[in-house]
Amino acid sequence: MAVDTQERPSASASTDAPAQQEGRVQRYRIRTGMFAWMMHRLTGVGLVVYLVIHIWGLTALTDPETFNALIAKYHSPLFKVGEFALLVAVAYHAMNGLRIVLIDFLGWSPKQKKLFWTLGAVTAVIILVGGWPSLYALGEWLFGPGSMPTFFL
Amino acid sequence: MAQTNALNWFLHRITGTFLIFMLITHFWVQHYDHQAASVTHEVVTEKGEMPDYPEEAKAGVRARYGEDAEVTPYQVVMQRLDDPVYAVLWKGFNILFLVVALHHGFYGLNNVMTDYIRDPMGRLIARALSWTLALGLLIIGMYSVITAGW
């Protein structure tokens, strides 16, 4: 772990006493901003892993048979779940990133709590509207054709 | 974070902002446009079975390749790429997308790794390996984009 412990304090920050120390690992109080930052990291690393797989997979574009097989695989139930998870990660990372940019470039830090919840609502809408095709597909497969409302599809 | 500088910090925010707009375009074309989307809202369970496409996609493929043309994912993509103007725009967009996404992703990954790897040698190795991977992906990605539809 990267957090500083009493056994090995960081060289530069020794004067800043940590908020709380219990045992070996420093415990942070997880507030809204901290949670947002942790999720940003997690989704970010996940998206890099996805990017590697995605670019690698698209080499299939050079051959029709391989490409058709790849896209057919993308339509399997497991990939549909993955597709939805991907959208959740992308939507969160993009909207939280937008929040960071607005705070850093436009000085919106006094409004950051409000910004967090507003963009949170936007994220929820993106996930629901954008993710509906995947949820629809999974529902149709699970409960039979015609069982899901089509809405805007 | 000795290697990090203000320019990269700034670039990370610029590339991130660009990615939002590029992703919207990418998602629209690849997933929501009924004629163009190669991945549709359908679950296929049989191995080797092809997904069924909307009427718009079928009409587009048949208009370009003849009435009895097979509507496969590859053909759905190629109906767009066989239009030379569209192909140039698509290739330009995707090369830019590739460069921006790789820079943003791997710069971010390096920030994370620098936070958790404390040994300077380890950091150097992690940085070298990750950027080598990014370069490799840039090369194979460019190859896929440039040669698609040839």
Image: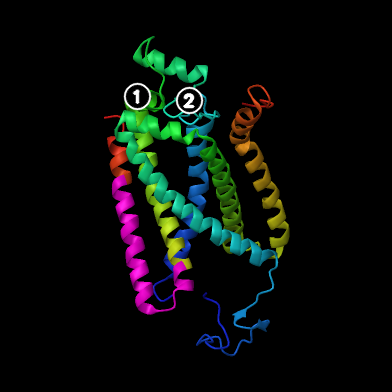
Report the chain holding disc 1: B
Q: Which residue is located at x 64 percent, y 37 percent?
A: A129
Quarter of image, res B143: top left
Q: Real-space Cα distance between discs 1 and 2?
A: 24 Å
Residue A150: within the magenta?
A: no
Q: Main secondary structure of the magenta part?
A: helix
Count residues near mark 2 (Cα–Cα under 10 Å), then give few for <14, some for 14-19, many for 20+.
Answer: many
The residue most toward the top is B67
The residue to which callout 1 is attached is B83
Q: Earlier in the sequence, mark 1 or mark 2?
A: 2
**Span of residues in magenta:** B113-140
Nearer-the-camera pick, B70 or A76: A76
Q: Is residue B73 above or below residue B114?
A: above
> Do the residues marked 1 and 2 share a common chain?
yes
Q: Which residue is located at x 35 percent, y 15 percent?
A: B65
Q: Which residue is located at x 39 percent, y 26 percent?
A: B80
Numbered disc total: 2
Please provide percent x and percent y for residue A76.
Answer: 50, 34
The residue to which callout 2 is attached is B51
Instruction: Name the mark on residue A144.
Output: none
